[in-house]
Image (cartoon, helix red, strand yellow):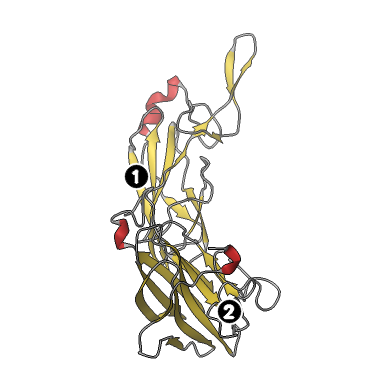
Amino acid sequence: MRVALIIIVALSLALAACGDGGQGGATADAVAADVGGDAIGVDTAGEDVGDGAAEDALAACEPVEVLVAEGGGAVPGEILHLSPAEILRGVRYRYTVEPPPGGRHAFEDDRPIYTPTFRVTALGTYRFRLDVIRLGEDEPCATSATEVVVGPGGGVLVELSWRTPGAGDATGGGDAVRADLDLHLAHPNARGYDLDGDGVGEGWFDDRWDVYWANLAPNWAAAGAADDPELFADDPDGGGPEVIVFAAPEAERVYRVGVHAWDDRGLGPSVARVRVVVNGVVALDRETELAHHDLWEVCTVAWPSGAVTPIEDGTGAALVRHEYWDLLFGL
């Protein structure tokens, strides 16, 4: 279900009394006003558009191009900067976004501003629309749109999405309760907890060496973030996606991908889907059913070869550790 989050952008002008004649004078600055405010339109020079310019204001309603500073392509986690190609008189602007399946809808800043920013998190096409609305009206008199295609880029990208049959149509939208699954990427140094009692830590939930919701962007190699992984869009109450981007893995390392069913919220099992993309090519695309507190050890990723190897149990099925919960959090 695609839901458009709406940001209303309006132009407002402060008037000050001046002179014995009581005439109003316009400031040179246009500031944002919310939907409920009384906005006075201004052009880019800050001139008042009053009653005398009503016909001009009405005639000015035309589509305004949506500009994206980063262009028509992006990678997950990138922040896009949007702006209108021009400022019209006597109108306000409304931005909406239609993301790809599972993509987030929230702008980075939900204040009414000309130039909102938006972080893309899912692979696919985002469609940004800009409505032009006359002051005092609710429906747009003109609309334009532009698209941004989000691709995997280089290095390793891991994407988790899921559906929960017991949630009906709740998964992926609305305010209904939904299951919570979490994506993990473990470094070879990860020890974590020994929950199976074999004397060796499984690596998951390691404070430093496992990327997950409590360790979104660890420093694994050289100083700086360029060679480190990052988890975008931890989704505690939806169907994902959760995405880990690792643009520059360390050489001669083998990483592990996992999925933990943190909380089924009483809805029963979920079907988890993991895609691993290496240098722009899908290397793995698998689904597995997970119950409450299950942990699915999905695959290994070797670097620099980029080889992705599914992790399986002795029967050739997916390796799922049942009732795998983290003692640290006392579940």
Q: Earlier in the sequence, mark 2 or mark 1?
A: 1
Q: Is residue 301 left or right of residue 100?
A: right
For the point 58% across and 79% down, the residue is: 194
Expressed as whole percent of the image width and height from the top left, the position of residue 262 reads 47, 64
Expressed as whole percent of the image width and height from the top left, the position of residue 241 reads 42, 64
Q: Which mark is residue 143?
A: 1
- Looking at the image, do the residues carrying marks 2 and 1 touch, with CB atoms under 8 Å apart? no
Amino acid tagged 1: Thr
Expressed as whole percent of the image width and height from the top left, the position of residue 31 reads 56, 35
For the point 37% across and 66% down, the residue is: 162
Q: Which mark is residue 319?
A: none
Q: Secondary structure at mark 1?
A: strand
Amino acid tagged 2: Asp
Q: Which residue is mark 2?
A: 194
Position of 134 relative to 127 (above/below): above
For the point 38% across and 69% down, the residue is: 291
Indicate the quadrant where residue 229 lies.
bottom right
